[in-house]
Image (cartoon, rainbow, N blue to C red):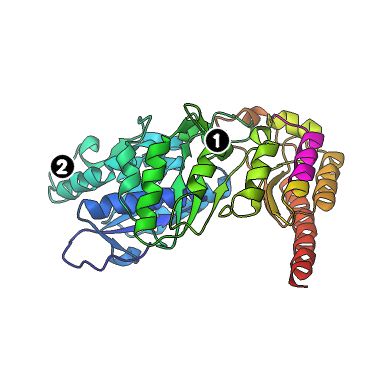
Amino acid sequence: MPANTDKTKKVKVFLRTFGCQMNMRDSELICGLLQKAGFLICDDADKADVIILNTCAVRQHAEDRVWSQIGAYKSGKIIGLVGCMAQHYKDGAFSRAENLSFVVGPQDIEKIPKIISQLSAFSCQPSAKSLFEKKIWETDGLIRPEEVYHTGFYEDNKHVSVVISEGCSNFCSYCIVPYVRGPLRHRRKKDIIREIQSALDKGADSITLLGQNVNAYQDGELNFLKLLKEIDSLKGLREFDFLTSHPKDTKNELFKLINDLVKLKKALHLPVQSGSDRILKLMHRGYNRKFYLDLVSKYRKVVKGGLLSTDIIVGFPTESVEDFKETLALVKDTGFNAAFIFKYSPRSLTESFKMIDTVSKQEKEQRHKMILELQQGISGKLRKKDKR
């Protein structure tokens, strides 16, 4: 996060972000809340009085990095774990990292300034020995106060991200998001427009709409398509896009809007996860291979030259060589402009966690490498084609 130039504030806070675009936006919200409360945001952990790690719990590798980083920080600082890992471990995080001072889940971030003030006061009282005086956790929140989204803090003043929905109710068998961010909840249209308009008034001209299942948005009778139309009409907006769409909620009408709306980018991120019907069913994705390929075909017929990207997981429990070959074939036949490829990581709380992780680490690495190399070749050819 960029440093605050106001040097009159004494308590310096360093914030490091792990994970997705939603986490990046959450970090901006936290910085905005801290600045509003009079704290100084700094970009050097060594000079900070308070260190906050905004975390992701989707993959084990990301969690391991966080625990390692916490252990590396010098003692004597107030250290906070926030985000999805905080919600996952709750007060149990203190036993994983003894130097942690506070733990705050995604729905409780508005409490962070008060928590830091409280802990700062405790640090001046050597006699405070109770765990409740030195360790604070807030992980019971259900809904964020709307005003959390209106601090006006953005890292990039020209391009800003705007959350339109929180949480997820899909319960894909491998995904921990519904358990740490809660069920799908939609912000009101008027609040979304208010936030966007405020950003535009301050000089932004590019917007990304965020949601774990963005195209399932609904506010009364206003659905995602109607929201896109309204945003497209805003004065001062040059372009906008959205992340992330779920195939089961994607309709041909969306493709028509991508093609027709002047300011909406001609691009679609549509996670497929696997090319095998058997694995897709085990993943609880709600569609099969044919359904997905039909969507891609319709998209490309309607949005001529539109970009297409995806997410893929390799090594899901019981994924056979034949299952993997079906994913390879889908990637080859579809010709994505880009793909984010992940090795399956067991996550507690999820349904797939109960399944035996049958694919070895070595095999996951090999499958990841094969798809990555295939996609890199496809992406390179498409880039060369575009330059002609």
Task: Identify the residue position indicated by label 1 in the image.
Answer: 176
137 over 199 or under it: above or below: above
Q: Which residue is drawn at 70% across and 38% down?
A: 252
Left/right of residue 214 with respect to residue 297 in the rendered view: left
Q: Residue at x 71, y 42 (%)?
A: 272
Q: Which amino acid does label 1 sit on?
A: Ile
Residue 105: mark in rendering: none
Residue 197's spot in the image, x, y percent?
Answer: 38, 50
Residue ranking furthest to the bottom: 388
Q: Is residue 344 in view from this perspective?
A: no
Distance in Å between CA atoms under marks 2 and 1: 37 Å
Nearer the camera: disc 2 or disc 1: 1
The quarter of the rendered structure image containing the N terminus is bottom left
> Please, what is the dominant secondary structure of the magenta stretch?
helix
Q: Does the magenta segment cover residue 296? A: yes
294 falls in the magenta region: yes
Give the residues in magenta.
286-299
Above or below, 330 against 185 in this view is: below
Front-lying residue, 13 or 62: 13
Give whichever of 26, 62 is nearer the camera.
26
For label 1, the crowd category at 10 Å Cα-Cα, with few meaning under 14, some 14 to 19 and many 20 or more, is: many
For residue 379, say whether it is visible. Answer: yes
In the picture of the structure, the residue carrying the numbered disc 2 is 128
Q: Residue at x 37, y 40 (%)?
A: 191
State the SS at label 1.
Answer: loop
